[in-house]
Image (tube, rainbow, N blue to C red):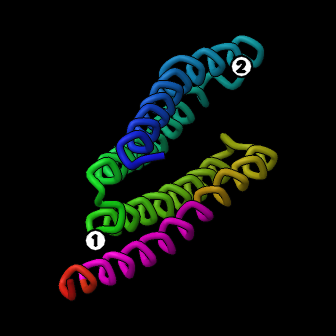
Amino acid sequence: MEQKSLSNWLKIIILGTGICGLIVYAYLIPVLGQELIAQYPECTHYFYPWLIFLWVSGIPCYIVLFFAFRIAANIGKDKSFSTENANYLKYVSLLAAGDSAFVFIVNIVFLICNINHPGVIMLFLFVIFAGIAISVTSAALSHLVRKAAVLQEESDFTV
């Protein structure tokens, strides 16, 4: 697969992911929350804190999609191994780590405020683990892309 074709496929996948995420965050989460409130009216005052928490935790995901789109564009320009892409991957790593920390802290605060359940925290531990895995992987890729960019620059100068 050539660079331009790969770049276009990556952009389509990234846009599709963004649209799916928008459907989940803008429609499914509020609708499911309203259904839970209908079944458990005593939890009505939990709805807005959880909705705001989930929306805020989604913001870094869209910033990461923006960086992924920029990386895909650079791949199409045959700049796969560039310091710019290494920086984007570093930002992705920081955003994933920050979002994981945010999710963990808010879940603990909600537990202390008695608007969370230990079972929900156990489920969110999988989300936190995935965020940490993405953070570590992005940091490693950032390091490798930066080293490859330096090697590529050195080889360009020797020719």
* Residue picked out by circle 2: 36
Q: Quadrant of the C terminus?
A: bottom left
Question: Would residue 122 appear left or right of 150 to someone viewing this image?
Answer: right
Q: Residue 25's mark? A: none
SS at mark 1? helix
- Amino acid on which the number 2 mark rests in the picture: Leu
Q: Which residue is at 58% across, 57% downward?
A: 131
Q: Magenta residues, as a range?
A: 132-153
Relative depth, front residue between 144 and 140: 144
Q: Which secondary structure, mark 2?
A: helix
Left or right placement of residue 62 versus residue 51 in this view: left
Q: Around disc 2, counting alpha carbons within 10 Å, would you say few (fewer than 14), some (14 to 19), or many (20 or more)?
A: some
Could you say which is closer to the camera, residue 128 or residue 65?
Answer: 65
Q: Main secondary structure of the magenta part?
A: helix
Residue 63 shows in this picture: no
Q: Residue at x 51, y 74 (%)?
A: 140
124 versus 101 height, above or below: above
> Does the magenta run of residues contain 4?
no
Horizontal and vertical percent position of residue 17: 50, 33
User: In the rendered structure, which disc, 1 or 2, sits on the residue that comes first in sequence?
Assistant: 2
Q: Is residue 46 left or right of residue 17?
A: right
- In the image, residue 7 sits, relative to residue 43, either above or below, namely below
Q: Which residue is mark 1?
A: 83
- Give the farthest residue toward the front: 159
Residue 153 picture quarter: bottom left
Determine whether label 1 and label 2 are within 8 Å by CB.
no
Residue 9 visible in the shown view: yes
Q: Is 7 left or right of 125, judged from the image as shown?
A: left
Mark 1 is surrounded, within 10 Å at the Cα level, by few (under 14), some (14 to 19) or many (20 or more) other residues, namely some
